[in-house]
Image: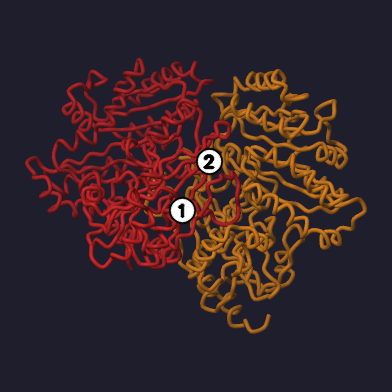
Chain colours: A orange, B red
Amino acid sequence: MQGHEEFTAAAASLLGPRGFTQDPDLVDPWLTDWRGRYTGRALGLASPASTAEVAALVKLCSAQGVPLVPQGGNSGMSGGATPDASGHALVVSLRRMNAITRIDEQAREITCQAGVILQALHEAVAPLGLRFPLTLGGKGSATIGGLISTNAGGTQVLRHGSMRAQVLGIEAVLADGSVFDALVPLKKDNRGFDLKQLLIGSEGTLGVITGATLRLLPALADRAVLWAGLNDIRAARKLLVHTETLAGDALEGFEVMPRHSLNAVLDHNPRARNPLAGDHAWYALIELVADAAGAAALPDRAQTLLESAFAAGLVEDATIAMNETQAEEFWALRDEIAPAERALGPAMQHDISVPVARMADFVAETLPQVEARFPGCTAVAFGHLGDGNVHYHVLAPQGAVRGDWEAREGKEISAFIHDLVTAWQGSISAEHGIGQMKVGELARLADPVHLAILASVKRALDPRGLLNPGKLIPSS
Amino acid sequence: MQGHEEFTAAAASLLGPRGFTQDPDLVDPWLTDWRGRYTGRALGLASPASTAEVAALVKLCSAQGVPLVPQGGNSGMSGGATPDASGHALVVSLRRMNAITRIDEQAREITCQAGVILQALHEAVAPLGLRFPLTLGGKGSATIGGLISTNAGGTQVLRHGSMRAQVLGIEAVLADGSVFDALVPLKKDNRGFDLKQLLIGSEGTLGVITGATLRLLPALADRAVLWAGLNDIRAARKLLVHTETLAGDALEGFEVMPRHSLNAVLDHNPRARNPLAGDHAWYALIELVADAAGAAALPDRAQTLLESAFAAGLVEDATIAMNETQAEEFWALRDEIAPAERALGPAMQHDISVPVARMADFVAETLPQVEARFPGCTAVAFGHLGDGNVHYHVLAPQGAVRGDWEAREGKEISAFIHDLVTAWQGSISAEHGIGQMKVGELARLADPVHLAILASVKRALDPRGLLNPGKLIPSS
């Protein structure tokens, strides 16, 4: 980029050769999101090594009017960490800031820098008999800062909540380069509205998260994983309520998938096996967990659940994983849906939520509406029924050409689904955030009062709009 | 008040005779906070009956530049709902808006207007086998709107969190009279930073909360209440960790009090009895709970806890309440500390927190420092050790005259304690909020970055400063 020599020289001087580069070989991999949907350009890649360096860099950006795009593992789903095409922005990677700075076993807290990878966090606390109760498919690349910025979800939200519920403290660099330091967690603190809540889910638009203190839980001693075949999605809802009543806090996961998704996985992965002999319209994957105190009672608890579900006519068939290997196999069937569906051909994917109690009805009523509106397409929904959140995919008609079909049909399909979700009082982004992918749809569909608050808080904290421009906040 | 005839006529016309009054007999009781510490004046008392009326009223206030002071049960601890002395502000009571509009037993949610009194909420859900997991001394007057505005705490925060953790949805009227409607709860919703989080704990400075959706839990089937005598506060910390390890989620309350507080209660209430034969430096009150599934195991669990605490040398003596009556008696000893201490004479009271793990050390180290600095005073701390939150009282020397002593010594004493808390990385308001009482101390002690964000968010959402002026946000 031309015209930015003064800035790039200052950034290079500030951060040193490991902290700043314009070498296309090093920069380009971070200019495209991992799904290959968005590609931007950038002035360069900054990789600060400390909060002080981030603060100095943001001050420099502020002084020179250079926009910046914070980036963690670059594994987001909405293009939130990819710069625009102008080439005026700086990508600021937090990946070098990957130190775990404190683990307090007794208080069950961990403090770390923003660039720590989720899997590394899991591995750091496991030997201490502790666990971090959030995981997701991208755990090998997703960073703590990115997870907080997008208020990430995953398969344990049912019991433990999203990232918001895990965050005890935050450190962030604000638009003027000042450091917001709230790393020391206080269980009770009523000195005004909670500023760290603003940063959670703000997708880098209000500040650059540089560190966090997170809660930990005692490690699990055992789990029981059930697989059930159901005649329809409303039966899954009934089974969920039944399970919540019977299992209470032991219920940690409740995922659903239709026949279509299971078959896609079985076709895609020759080693995958159907846990049940027969064929069912829907499947539910249920995980019950226990700590050391409850482990002895867990098998009985799972068995009782299974038998009572049969007795109540909630399941057509069901089985309990006999051992940890089989439990992993059950979960693999769920985790492999996304790649298996991808292999079938082009699809439009939607991460949506409606009120938990209404999700089964939403799925049952709207899947046929989508297929009627877009003949030849197949609509499938799978995922976190217990959170009122499913991944709602519309698969192209057979023979559709990848890239071409999405470009031609995608926008209309997504708009149709987002309209349905909005009519059902739901959210067009349940757990993936808005990023650049959904910013137009947010502007189109969100309550104007909601949008006005987003915009005014953004203006208040980043008056020049230098933090991750074009993401999350519709330009007015 | 003169010069506001046009406004008061319009307000009277808008709200009708039940909704607007200037009659001093009706207005004056709401111009003094319940502890009698703050008295203000007001243009009148508005009591809107619906969100639409609140919105119209706020629009009117906005058009005419009239500040407004939202008020719930007027049972706050920091003067947050008392107008200033100017007489220019309107008190807006939410007490008429006391309808429970929806209970979803299966989803375990309740939606209600802001003026519903906490105890009424408890009583509405109990017959359904559900409970709302937050309670506090003022439950007979505190309203849901006030509890959200102050992010209220209480004795169940240890397990269930503050009000913030109970709020699934909010409806509020913003400074321009627009209605922010987020009453329908979505378990997952990542459409930007969570605006309802801003309103929680904002003490009426960002909007007038008009309704909320709250989470409910299954009713408890049984509880076990333990009373322990300890040789010092650090033993209480060890006992807390021991109890957390052994009882896990069954632990719902862990309160501590020193000998001084127990003796004050025993002196104050002739019917109160000491649960233990001997005398101890500190006491801990522990509550374990169980739902229907866990009730059978609860007595054994409590007994095991008691025996292991003896065996580990954590307690000098301890007992388990033999029945519900005795359990109530144990809790009454805790609940009566505040009035009992008040009866002893004047005192300066502080609602403070430090990181949970450090609270025992904080108490042990700072009580003597306070007594050394203010000779003749007695410093006592009691309350929510498990939340890192104690009520830290400094009792006047014998013979001090109420009113006179506080006026002469109070500010210096509070400043000394707030300085200590700040040095220990704690909060000068753990659960009572800032209100008008602590706004000066917040300005003096808070991180300037924190203050700058508070001020800029306030300016963004209430640019003319009409919402509860003089509370929470230090004027710059």
Q: Residue at x 79, y 48 (%)?
A: A370
Q: Nearer the viewer, residue A297 or B196?
A: B196
Mark drawn on residue B417: none
Residue type (three-letter) at the residue carrying disc 1: Ala
- Left of B219 or right of it: where is B41? left
Q: Residue at x 54, y 65 (%)?
A: A455
Residue type (three-letter) at the residue carrying disc 2: Leu
Label 1 resides on the chain identified as: B
In the figure, A64 relative to B252: above or below?
below
Count of labels in the image = 2
Q: Quadrant of the C terminus of chain B?
A: bottom left
Is there any visible trace of residue A81 in the rendered image?
A: no
Q: Count residues near mark 1 (Cα–Cα under 10 Å), then give few for <14, some for 14-19, many for 20+.
A: some
Label 2: element kind: loop
Label 2 resides on the chain identified as: A
- Left of A299 or right of it: where is B308? left
Query: Mark 2 and mark 1: span between their CA atoms?
Result: 44 Å
Q: Residue at x 23, y 57 (%)?
A: B41
- Left of B170 or right of it: where is B344? left
What residue would you read off at disc 1?
Answer: B52
Label 1: element kind: helix
Mark drawn on residue A216: 2
Q: Nearer the viewer, residue B170 or A315?
A: B170
Write down the quadrant of residue A255 in the picture: top right
Callouts 2 and 1 close, C-beta under 8 Å: no
Write down the quadrant of residue B264 in the picture: top left
Q: Quadrant of the N terminus of chain B?
A: bottom left
User: x and y percent of residue A254 in the render?
Assistant: 67, 35
User: x and y percent of residue B47 in the render?
Assistant: 35, 50
Q: Count residues near mark 2 (Cα–Cα under 10 Å), then give few for <14, some for 14-19, many for 20+.
A: many
User: Which residue of the protein is positioned furthest toward the left in this rendering?
Assistant: B399
In the figure, B418 relative to A334: above or below?
below
